[in-house]
Amino acid sequence: MTKKTLWMASMPAPLLIAMLLLLPGPRSLAANDQPSGTATEVKIDNFVFGPQTITVPVGATVTWTNKDDIPHTTVSTDGVFKSKVMDTDEKFSFKFTKAGTYSYFCSVHPKMTGKVVVQ
Amino acid sequence: MTDKNKDLIDQKLQDLNNDGVDRRGFLKCMAWAGTGLVWTMSGGIPSSRAFAKSHGKDAGKGGDFSFVQISDSHIGFNKPANPDVTATLQTAINKINAMPDKPDFIIHTGDLSQLSKPSEFDTLDQVLKGASAKQIYFVPGEHDMLTDNGEQYLQRYGKGTKGGGWYSFDQKGVHFLGLVNVANLKAGGMGSLGHEQLEWLEDDLKGRSASTPIVLFAHIPLWTIYPDWGWGTDDSEQALSYVKRFGSVTVLNGHIHQIMQKVEGKVSFHTAMSTAFPQPAPGTAPSAGPMKVPADQLQRVLGITDVNYLVSGRSLAVVDSPLDLGTSPSGNGGGSGGR
């Protein structure tokens, strides 16, 4: 399809493997934001928080992204966190520094609920 | 309209609420009548007749009046379901201005804006300024309270109202109550009126004659249409208990972007179409998000609601009109409607 693909496909396999091995490890990790386990994504899609319950370690940052055509919010039922209104593709992040179970909902569409379990 | 398109519309508009109102038949009747269909509520029993006839005959009698309900203009929305919601609101206003009998006022049942932005409210004001009816009554939708618990809404549209924006007024013997059920919503719940407003409502209705026609209007339906999507109001039962003794009660709502009707005793419930975009019938889609229809069919699922009060029968007749009835073969996509 692209020139690059063709170029790589035409290379001898050992050379390709050598090139891949040369890719700098730490930097590619950084490109993925953070090591797995401390960052968690929740997608808001079709008026649902997904996953509805997530379990993360203490210190993790959870990021919500609104994939709907309709604005949503993420509001802790106990007042621990409260996002601004998120329009399409907008995000909200919160860092959980204490263990516990945090229930939250969308204050615009309160039928939408979710939980963050911090261990 | 091609048979295929017609089927598509029929499919989208079919009644899935099992409440005895088949909107597919309703729309077909409207197309047949050419201008619409009147639902006359008399002693709790709805009867229908051609709109044009009754409208001409009864109009102008002493004490009779009419108003128009518009809803869910969502100014600021620009997604594929309708990239130009300002234009469709303008079409709705043009349609109102072209009515042979000028409505006394307009009621907007909320979601004026998409994101509660000042610029969105400004645009709305600009369009509404062009309405021939100068008096417009508002109630907020959840989209109008997104940023500041509704403070901006109250400043702009809620001057002189009580609490979170509720109020009542009288028009030629009919008592109107504008209610707010989009504030302080609780996790897992639906719309909510709250204790303070319910107390005010009970108090407001106390001492009024049972023969006074009552009109309740609020954004989210005051009857439970589909709890899974939050299409109802948790404490509406209590509100409705206060109006039970009245002989004629009409409840007008928005929020669900489609027509739904129900009659329960002397209370008739009605939801209006949006002027911005349609939403799916309950349970027919993964969520209640905006429904995309072919561009040339959009104006057939957007519309306005005309309400006529006839003094003779102390009854209110509710007539829904799409922005475009779809009578022209080309679909009249950007036109000013089917009139």
Image (cartoon, helix red, strand yellow):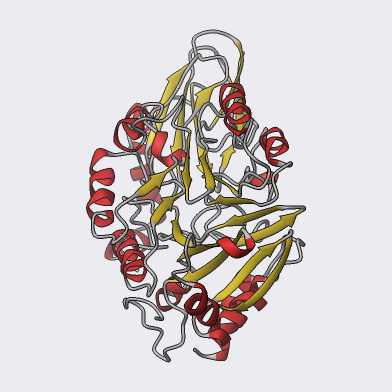
Residue at (46% x, 66% y) in the render: B302
The C terminus of chain B: image quadrant: bottom left
Residue at the outermost front position: B62
Residue at (23% x, 43% y) in the render: B119
Q: Is residue B19 above or below residue B330?
A: above
Give the mark count.
Answer: 0
Using the rendered view, name the quadrant where residue B337 is placed: bottom left
Residue at the outermost top position: A98
Q: Position of residue B148 (x, y in %)?
A: 36, 26
Q: Is residue A86 visible to us here? A: no
Residue at (48% x, 59% y) in the render: B63
Viewer-proximal residue, B333 or B252? B252
Q: Is residue A33 visible to us here? A: yes
Q: Position of residue A92 (x, y in %)?
A: 40, 29
Viewer-proximal residue, A12 or B186? B186
Using the rendered view, name the quadrant where residue B235 is placed: top right
Q: Is residue B296 above or below residue B41?
A: below
Residue at (65% x, 54% y) in the render: B269
Q: Position of residue B274 (x, y in %)?
A: 46, 59
Q: Position of residue B202 (x, y in %)?
A: 63, 29
Viewer-proximal residue, B37 or B249? B249
Q: Is residue B148 above or below residue B103?
A: above
Is B54 on the left-hand or right-hand side of B70? right
Viewer-proximal residue, A56 or B28? B28
